[in-house]
Image (spheres, grey):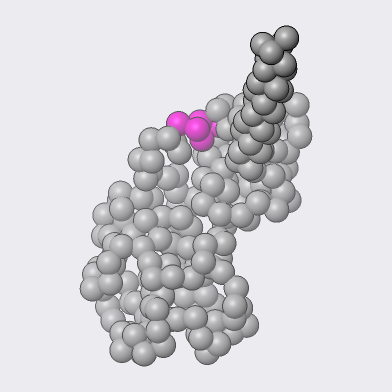
Amino acid sequence: MLRKRLVLPVLGLSLLFAGLFLATNNSAIAASNLSWGSRGAEVVQLQDTLNNRGYWCGTADGIFGANTYNALINFQKDAGFTPDGTVGPDSRQALGMAEAVASNSGSTVSRSGSTTPRGSGTLTMVATGYDSSWESNYPYYGQPSYIGLPLARGIIAVDPNVIPMGTRLYIEGYGEGIAADQGNAIKGNRVDLYFDSRQEALDWGMKTVKVTIL
């Protein structure tokens, strides 16, 4: 009788832990899906991939909106998937995104003829500095970067027609960063570098620097 009494609680605990594991695993899988409203570097990768495959969704701005949704639906139809407008494991694999994320190779597809693909060399650009102050961010004070990353040193505002969002960069005199922000005044061969303080941004001023695409 004692063994029977022990078996039932142990079995119950085993089922409980198994259920918790499955629930956690399913949550992680669901969290990795991309759908309307998603933002960030993975959306930039999705948009670049769709554009490269001929499913044009416009500029790869890191925001999953109507153009990205329609392009994805067309891809899913042609691929024989249920067109649900969501990038789940099957669509991710068919697009080749899983391999790209795992390899972390840093390569990207140029969005248009005017953009600079990663690993393509060095550009000479004018660099200014900004910070988290109201003066630097009006009318977007208090908001994260354009692709959703929190503002911190290493965040760089670029013209997406010159450098694609999500591109890793090395800035002469500043260090490494990521093209994750945009600005009304940042057009052409201009970059704006985030600094931790207002004084650091002012001290940087305006410089002509070498920008290396990593």
Can you tell which quarter of the image residue 46 is in?
A: top right
Residue 31 x, y percent position in the rendering:
63, 42
Residue 30 x, y percent position in the rendering:
66, 38
Q: Is residue 128 magenta?
A: no
Of residues 23 and 188, which is closer to you in this image? 23
Residue 202's place in the image compared with 214, above or below, is below
Q: Determine if residue 27 is in view.
A: yes
Of residues 136 and 150, which is closer to you in this image? 150
Can you tell which quarter of the image residue 73 is in?
A: top right
Quadrant location of the N terminus in the rendered image: top right
Which residue is farthest front?
1
Residue at position x 55%, y 87% in the image: 134
Magenta highlight range: 95-99
Q: Is residue 98 magenta?
A: yes
Residue 11 x, y percent position in the rendering:
68, 18
Query: Relative to residue 59, is residue 20 drawn left or right?
Result: right
Residue at position x 66%, y 47% in the image: 68
Disc tally is 0
Residue at position x 27%, y 67% in the image: 175
Judged by its main secondary structure, the magenta piece is helix
Residue 55's place in the image compared with 122, above or below, is above
Residue 154 x, y percent position in the rendering:
38, 67
Residue at position x 37%, y 45% in the image: 106
Q: Determine if residue 188 is in view.
A: no
Of residues 111 and 178, which is closer to you in this image? 178
Can you tell which quarter of the image residue 138 is in?
A: bottom right
